[in-house]
Amino acid sequence: MEELVATPERQTKAQARLTELGAPAVAAIIRAMDDRRPLASPYIALTNKAKDAFEGSRQYSPKLVVDALAAILNQITGERFGFIYNGASGAERAQCAAGWRIYAREIARR
């Protein structure tokens, strides 16, 4: 998580690494969703996996670490508990994080 707030270059590499970790890292990423520090750069690009995609990447303007983590979790799982990828209010961020925590508990039971 420290890399996400260091420099734009390190942030980009960290985002890619987190995404590459895939499903085994989901619970750990969710545990970090209380991180409200500003990102090094308000930009994230993720490969567009939609079947009807008209662009190769999805691009967002997250403001805080939690915003970027929500986008990365969506990329890994296909799930979404609020759209905060371009920034959001504190209440929207809290609601999104709460949804991801419920998801984490459910996948832990499987």
Image: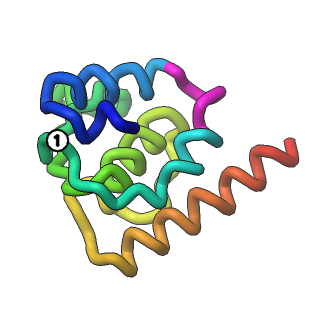
Query: What crowding class fits label 1: few (fewer than 14 Cα within 10 Å), some (14-19), or many (20 or more)?
Result: many
The stretch in magenta equals 21-26
Question: Which amino acid does the dot numbered 1 rest on?
Answer: Ala
Q: Where in the figure is residue 29, as x and y percent of width and height?
A: 53, 41
Secondary structure at numbered mark 1: loop
Residue 93 part of the magenta-drawn span: no
Residue for badge 1: 40
> Does 48 sit above or below residue 108?
above
Residue 22 belongs to magenta span:
yes
x, y percentage for residue 36?
34, 60
Q: Main secondary structure of the magenta part?
A: helix
Q: Quadrant of residue 4?
A: top left
Please give the name of the residue rendered at 51% of the width and 63% of the height, measured from the top-left corner. 97
Question: What colour scheme has been applied to the protein in the rendered image?
Answer: rainbow
Residue at horizontal 18%, vertical 46%? Answer: 60
Picture quadrant of residue 72:
top left
Residue 41's place in the image compared with 105, above or below, is above
Q: Residue at x 69, y 51 (%)?
A: 104
Q: Is residue 42 left or right of residue 91?
A: left
**39 or 100, nearer to the observer:** 39
